[in-house]
């Protein structure tokens, strides 16, 4: 770590804002005395308000380099250190106003941020067990209740396994068990989804899909055929070992472009998840590959999830800014949604995560209020038939009032 600065701070009123590396990592401000022995740490960005009215920003100068920045309090002195180059800016504003001003001046921010569509996602109601029938039931219920939904998004569970993105799960593919003398008919690998995507479009909606392009499972056909494409393990999931895809392989990157070229024939809205895996070893290569995917998908709307935040600036339309939610906990998601509200309309559209409004959701009114105040991308992930009167009313209200892609008032 290299010494950057030493600041005299007001122990009673001083605050420090820590910016997390990826979507699920905490990003919020705390009192200068609130770190205990561990100190504070921001990934590429740390803001210190020694006393009300002034903010010191310590920030990377490029999305290609994300240094860790640490702050340690000793008495009334806050020592700032970093393991890479950062700029030190002093702004006569509150921390969140200062962060907003920094975002507006950051060179990699997009020239234009597109307005977000509204959506329904299968994620939190059905998880990986979602079926064709579930999607159709909710499309019909959306029409019945006249909910203003643009996109119907298939989330995790539509694919046969992680990494095999051109092979739908058997329950989505009516041809998957059919054979003729032991051979499957020659056809587009995603043809089994045509009936569902045609149904979504004929119902007046846009088909969307979830893909985790930079990871692959040890049981996938992809890694069986190309074991050399397996990068480091990032843990277990989906009953197998999950590997980061080795983006240093030209063939692996070319494969991804082929995958998205075919997916783009069926979908024009993409939720790209687990993107941090692509940046573990090489941020420039991550940005290059994501830019190639962006170009391949043309005008499709891209939402990033579990993404390294600063390295993804300028490459996606919307960013999931919060942790996952459950019916009994939205606390971490609320913390991040508020703590990253300054990014909306400056770097991308902020995606807080879907509304969950069915009666079993604890604190559902509080979560709806968080989305109302700080949510740019408005989606729902309930089984529509499970909603009571309040749930239907708040769902319609939020979907009917999508904010423009302009900055929110400062928190």
Image (cartoon, rainbow, N blue to C red):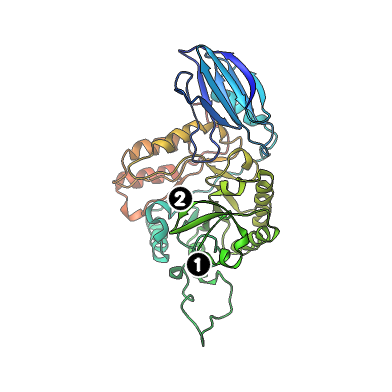
Residue at horizontal 65%, vertical 42%? 314
Query: Residue farthest to the bottom?
Result: 181
Which residue carries the number 2 mark?
A: 148
Residue 116 sits above or below residue 9 on the image: below
Q: What is the distance, in whole Å, between disc 2 and disc 1 at their CAs? A: 28 Å
Residue 191 sits above or below residue 247 on the image: below
Which residue carries the number 1 mark?
A: 168
Please provide percent x and percent y for residue 25: 49, 37
Please provide percent x and percent y for residue 151: 50, 54
Judging depth in this view, the residue of 298 and 287 nearest the camera is 287
Judging depth in this view, the residue of 290 and 153 nearest the camera is 290
* Drawn side of residue 335 relative to residue 58, left or right: left
Sooner in the amino-acid sequence: mark 2 or mark 1: 2
Asked if the residue under mark 1 is in contact with the one under mark 2, i.e. CB atoms within 8 Å, the reply is no
Please provide percent x and percent y for residue 5: 63, 18
Label 1 element class: loop
């Amino acid at each position: 770590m290299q010494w950057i600065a030493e600041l005299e701070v007001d122990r009673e009123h001083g605050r420090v804002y820590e910016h997390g590396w990826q979507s699920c990592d905490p990003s919020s401000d705390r009192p200068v005395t609130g770190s205990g022995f561990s100190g504070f740490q921001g990934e590429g960005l740390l803001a210190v308000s020694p006393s009300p009215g002034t903010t010191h920003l310590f920030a990377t100068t490029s999305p290609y380099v994300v240094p860790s920045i640490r702050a340690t309090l000793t008495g009334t002195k806050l020592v700032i250190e970093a393991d890479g180059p950062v700029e030190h800016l002093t702004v006569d504003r509150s921390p969140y106003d200062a962060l907003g001003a920094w975002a507006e001046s950051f060179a990699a921010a997009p020239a234009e941020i597109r307005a977000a569509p509204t959506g329904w996602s299968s994620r939190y109601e059905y998880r990986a067990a979602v079926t064709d029938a579930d999607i159709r039931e909710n499309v019909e219920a959306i029409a019945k209740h006249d909910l203003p939904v643009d996109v119907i998004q298939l989330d995790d569970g539509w694919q046969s396994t992680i990494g095999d993105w051109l092979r739908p799960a058997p329950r989505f593919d009516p041809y998957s068990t059919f054979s003729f003398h032991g051979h499957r008919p020659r056809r587009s690998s995603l043809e089994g989804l045509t009936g569902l995507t045609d149904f979504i479009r004929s119902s007046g909606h846009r088909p969307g899909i979830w893909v985790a392009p930079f990871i692959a499972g040890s049981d996938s056909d992809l890694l069986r055929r190309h074991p050399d494409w397996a990068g480091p393990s990032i843990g277990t999931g989906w009953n197998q070992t999950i590997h980061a895809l080795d983006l240093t392989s030209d063939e692996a990157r070319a494969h991804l472009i082929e995958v998205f070229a075919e997916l783009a024939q069926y979908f024009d809205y993409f939720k790209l998840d687990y993107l941090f895996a692509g940046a573990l070893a090489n941020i420039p290569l991550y940005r290059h590959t994501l830019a190639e995917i962006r170009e391949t998908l043309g005008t499709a709307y891209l939402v990033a999830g579990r993404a390294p935040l600063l390295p993804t600036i300028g490459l996606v339309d919307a960013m999931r800014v919060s942790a996952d939610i459950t019916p009994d906990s939205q606390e971490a998601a609320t913390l991040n949604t508020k703590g990253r509200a300054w990014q909306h309309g400056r770097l991308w559209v902020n995606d807080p995560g879907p509304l969950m409004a069915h009666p079993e959701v604890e604190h559902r009114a509080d979560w709806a209020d968080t989305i109302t105040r700080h949510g740019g991308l408005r989606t729902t992930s309930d089984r529509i038939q499970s909603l009571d009167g309040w749930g239907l009313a708040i769902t319609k209200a939020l979907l009917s009032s999508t904010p423009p892609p302009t900055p929110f008032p400062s928190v």
